[in-house]
Image: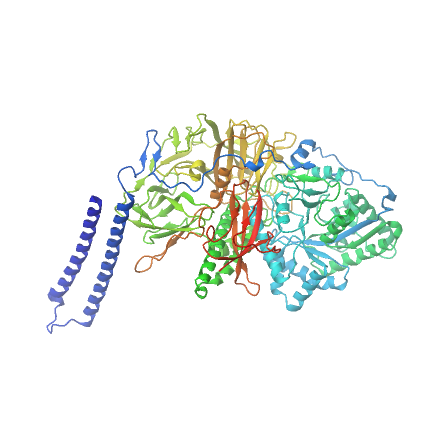
Amino acid sequence: MKLKKQVTVCGGAIFCVAVFSLYLMLDRVQHDPARRQSAGNFPRSQISVLQNRIEQLEQLLEENHQIISHIKDSVLELTDTGAISPSGHLPFRSANGSWVLPFDDRPTFLSVKPLDCQFALGRRSQTDLQMLDVYSLLSFDNVDGGVWKQGFEITYEPNEWDDEPLQVFVVPHSHNDPGWIKTFDKYYSDQTQHIFNNLVVKLAEDPRRKFIWSEISFFAKWWESADVHKQEAMRKLILSGQLEIVTGGWVMTDEANAHYSAMIDQLIEGHQWLEKNLGVSPRSGWAVDPFGHSATMPYLLKRANMSSMLIQRVHYSIKKHFAATRSLEFMWRQAWDIESGTDMFCHMMPFYSYDVPHTCGPDPKICCQFDFKRLPGSRVNCPWKVPPRAITDANVAERAGVLLDQYRKKSKLFRSKVLLVPLGDDFRYDKALEWDQQYFNYQKLFDYMNSHPEMHVKAQFATLTDYFNAVYKANGVAPGTRPPDYPVLSGDFFTYADREDHYWSGYYTSRPFYKNLDRVLESHLRGAEILYSLAVAHVRRAGLEGRYPVSDYSLLTDARRNIGLFQHHDAITGTAKEAVVIDYGNRFLNKSVQISSCADTIFFLFLRYLVLFNPIEQERLCVVTMLVNSARVRVLTEDGQTLPVQLSAQWVSAVEMSGEVYQASFMARLPALGLAVFHLYDSADAPMMLRSDTLLRIPGRVYNDSFSLSLACSFLHQSIRRKDDPQEVRVQIQFLTYGTRPSKDKSGAYLFLPDGNAKPYSQREAPIVRVVEGPLFAEVVAHYQHFQQTVRVHNVPGIDGLSLDITTMVDIRDQNNKELAMRLVTDIQSGDTFYTDLNGFQIQPCRYFQKLPLQANFYPMPAMAYIQDSQYRLTLHTAQALGVSSLASGQLEVILDRRLMQDDNRGLGQGLKDNKRTANRFRLLLERRSNSGKVISFPSLLSHMTSTILNHEVLALPVLPRKHGVPPMRTFAPLAGTLPCDFHLLNLRSIQSQVNESPGRKMCVSIDFTCCETDEDLRVHNEKNFSHFLVLLQPMSLSLMHSQPPLSNDSSINLEPMEISAYKLKLC
């Protein structure tokens, strides 16, 4: 009550001062002789001035009244809650020097134990081929194979096809990169639009002609500019089966760096466009150019209702081994699948490339003679100095015999007498002449072969699905079903090498600035999608549809497509020309930035109100840091509770603080997928604001409630000790540099070709080290010449406080042919095994092979990597894709950035010289292990949640107050409760109307049941989920093109571990 009286007296004093000021001003105006007029009247100008001043004072009185009312409400609230009670509710230091926060009797949003997923115990898919075992088996000796340099000599008996003729399916195609040497728009205007224009004419000339197309980003651009007649001609070709859309994603996605959520989004964008405009559904996957292949891709295609797929860029030794064992076609099964529910039929192309010289058979010198675009007089010729010859009646018999010999040799590598022969290359068929050259000459060859029974062959133009259907038919099985005796495979196909020791592990890190930006914008887009869908449903239910700007849907569509475009295998990989990279960046800024937050801008306290969005499905307790323009900050919750604030300096350089901007950090509890409102203002009375201590020395330890971090004089921490564990684990951070080879082939955008082992990073001066300690977090910042590393420990209950927050700001723009690496050195006995993720979706075990060169032992790390022994697991979570390895037991090494001055001879024609100052963000998590010895490994629930909060940060949205009064905002909690911690809402996406560009009344929800079983089914009904009325719940394929019967609103949704499912919802 004493506090209440003090604040009331203070408020009354403010009021009295305001009234007395008004009295003095009126008195001065009334008695000033210079202002008095003889007639007793004021001039009009002075009356106007007086009226303005009176209005200003009235407004001041109204604001004072609001402040007094707010103080009164706060006093009442504080009296009820005791939020600023001096008895133990202010942060204080414990005996060991760590900060203790005010007690919060509410539980943190989830309770987790660092255990591997229970369902994974003892599970391993039953497969004939496990890629890690295959790597252990092979010698990788690269013996010269003759005409097939990377293979072996192929022989056959002439009568092998007497009983069953060889079926040859020649599949014309054109691979169009949505940006590489040219920008997306430049490629379209120069080449791609002409391919489409020729296609609609040339395929119609002969119904026997076939063609396949993959990239919907280009197809959609052509469709928008084509007239009705061309559109109808294209639709007719597709419906007749002459033109097949394969995969049907917005792009042919990269499979090493792309996150699985972005891979799904670009697939949905392409498939939804196809459904709306053409009404067709892709049946087969086609991936000829991604630089290595992930096991995630067959799973996504399977969930999208496809039955078959094709891959090309696989290590040449793997191809040779698979060809020798006739295992180039197999069922690709996920590592956790003990049955066959995830099986996808996959065809691996056997030779060096997808171009014509490497697709008809093992001898590229002969195959090049059947690429009729290279006829004499063309700008393109055959490197083997033997040009093609046009097919005539005089030479058709000899030419057909030569080609059939290649077909037969290639068919010996497969288990059926059905052969696939792709016919195309990059940006082929852009000239009408090439259509005639290829189709006329091949048709003459086919006609001759088919009319001579003694050749025992049937050849034809075909689509990809035509080929797969023929394989299934030849084996007597339904599409997508395992043919008898075909092998089952699990694992992935990284790291790719196309020749010698040229391993494509450089692009795992190339241009990390854009890899990081992509991940941030993916999270922002997802948040915008979810909020937009909920907002539209809310206004429709409230009958306010006409007042909500549904035209904003076009911004979401543009953002989806620009982020989808960046998943292309020459975009997120960092392997495009500088001008093309700038174009991708401009697309990000011009479109996607409109859905981004303002979290990093300076928060001027006259704005006063801040809305925080929690983009994850669980309630979140976290530290939020804002840049403010005042050192006197008070933060109130929506109900008036004052929150502790840690005020820290904003450093403009290693040794200079800003005098105008500060960091204000407070702990926020946010609802799942919800919005929370906070009031920030400049207040001389800020009882819960504590200033951070800044030290210019290294303390022995930094603490929080979960662990302690031991620091060395060089700052790079030396050991971590968990609170529940008496044993310390050595964790030392080292920085190293790699050079490139001094001669011949050198590192470039694609290749990592180091000049030997890494060398320790060194500089003449000792680093400048700064330590900041406060109640909410402590951090250590070390400034080196080429990087700045910040290690932060959060003193927060729950997930945020269980791992180290690490940010490494890298700037190597003054270096030549250098790559900067960060190495973690521990005493964990991990041996030669470490684990990386595939696309943030699943974990893949890796092994360091001494028989392979150093660069072959690096793998993609889109989300995490870890090492472990029987007692501990150390996981490095990342917010951007980078390359990772473990070159010795107990080590984990990440390439942070690369600056290379030359091309690596893979077609780009440039080095990597456009580096930017880049923040690489990580979370380092140390866990005790209670399970060991499993063949299959998964992240713990704690690890899964750590990755989620790292990649989906809280979005801060400053709000301008109204001129009078408080903005009508309140907490928005769309879920009645927190969802299980192993459940992830991939997206809640409004589905575009079939008649225009606005959102329809339906939306789709994509959910991922990540890795653990729970005790109850996930139920979807009004009381337990969305607070809106659910009138439709319909299971869909992953890309929303295939539906199942709708479910009742109280139905149980049974999700198996590692299952991704999609549902169509309608909320009224």
Q: Is residue 358 above or below residue 223?
A: above
Q: Position of residue 355 (x, y in %)?
A: 72, 49
**Residue 314 at what x, y percent from top left?**
67, 41
Q: Position of residue 130 (x, y in %)?
A: 66, 36
Count how many numbered circles sit on residues in the image: 0
Residue reaching furthest to the top? 727
| Residue 466 placement, left or right of 334 | right
| Residue 410 visible at all | yes
Most distant residue in the bottom direction: 39
Q: Quadrant of residue 867?
A: top right
Q: Nearer the viewer, residue 570 or 728?
A: 728
Q: Is residue 773 left or right of residue 201?
A: left
Is 545 displayed left or right of 151 in the figure? left
Of residue 642 and residue 1024, the one placed in the foreground of this image is: 1024
The quadrant of the image that shows the N terminus is top left
User: Residue 96 falls in which quadrant of the image?
Assistant: top left
Coloring scheme of the render? rainbow
Q: Which residue does the image show at 27% across and 53% down from the upper left? A: 70
Residue 189 or residue 1056, whichever sits in front: 1056
Percent across and percent down for residue 718 are 45, 28
Instruction: Let me know if residue 498 appears in the view.
Output: no
